[in-house]
Image (cartoon, rainbow, N blue to C red):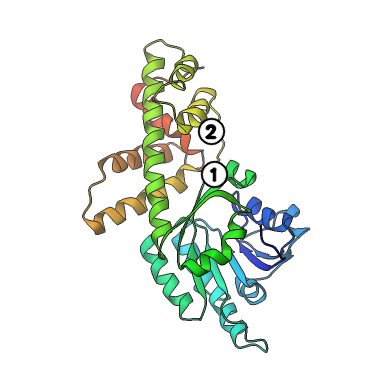
Amino acid sequence: MASTPQRLGFIGLGIMGAPMAGHLLAAGHTVFVHTHGKVPADIASRATVCASSREVAQKADIVFTMVPDTPDVQAVLFGQDGVAEGLKASASGPAGRVGKTVVDMSSISPIETKAFARRINELGCDYLDAPVSGGEVGAKAASLTIMVGGPQAAFDRVLPLLQLMGKNITLVGGNGDGQTTKVANQIIVALNIAAVGEALVFASKAGADPAKVRQALMGGFAASRILEVHGERMIKRTFNPGFRIQLHQKDLNLALQGAKALGVSLPGTANVAQLMQACAAHGLADSDHSALVRALEILAKHEVAS
């Protein structure tokens, strides 16, 4: 935990961003916030609500961003009334406050991240890409896994703040490496969801009780966090979003785009991306990514039953 209160900014107060900003507020920091739409009441009552990202960057020394996709980060940072304008205004003001830090916690393109970092660095400020894993549950419990790319000094400076939001925090390498790690994470998660879905569809159609199959498998080598949490979701049909299919689709597209640029084949990833596309086509884009099992159920003409 940071030893003294700091002036922080947080842009993006959705399912993930709101609880993350809440942890910073609970630790006694002054937090300036801005988001698309209405600021959640519990955040508005404790934070200073700003009219723009520019205003947040002017007032805060460390600015966190948590928005859905690469174009959203670009707009927040470099669009009209964006963070970059606020950094420029702050540097030219009476106090001349240069050397601020921008920490993007969104999950976006590693290639674009490197370009964003260079532009922020040109303004005399540090940039960290720090995407997270753990979903809404992890955001609320402050137990997120945080994968960071950027300079060591900036990481050391921000680490006490990241520790308010997560538990497993790793500086992977330079700018872009945090986002690359997140893409790798999403590949693993997607393939595991598909594996659990296939197993439960198979077991259920064969006549076994999927709940008992899951219970038995949790004690063996097939045990996993995905089987534990998402296997239960598949059986109980609780597909309210912790992490939406459309966001996981975006992450897998980043993986496939990166693979094409690198000349790497990702056949499993491509297959799961198509299953998620099938789910989206059936109106499940806003469902939890565990609803990927629905595509498999449609193919099997059989629904996993409790």
Separation of marks 2 and 1 at Cα, in angstroms: 14 Å
Closer-to-camera residue (123/154): 154
Which of the two discs, 2 and 1, sits closer to the camera? 1
- Residue at 42% over, 75% down: 118
Circle 1 sits in a helix, a strand or a loop, which is it?
A: helix
- Could you say where residue 102 lies in the image, as x and y percent from the top left? 54, 69
Residue 109, can we see it?
no
- Could you say where residue 64 lies in the image, as x and y percent from the top left? 58, 63
Q: What amino acid type should be assigned to the residue bearing mark 2?
A: Phe
Q: What amino acid type should be assigned to the residue bearing mark 1?
A: Gly
- Residue 239: numbered disc: 2
User: Can you identify the residue that label 1 sits on?
Assistant: 135
Q: Where is the N terminus found, in terms of image quarters? A: bottom right
- Could you say where residue 72 lies in the image, as x and y percent from the top left? 50, 63
Q: Quadrant of residue 194?
A: top left
- Residue at 49% over, 55% down: 131
Q: Is residue 84 above or below residue 139?
A: below
Local packing at callout 1 (Cα closer than 10 Å; few below 14, some 14-19, many 20+) is: some
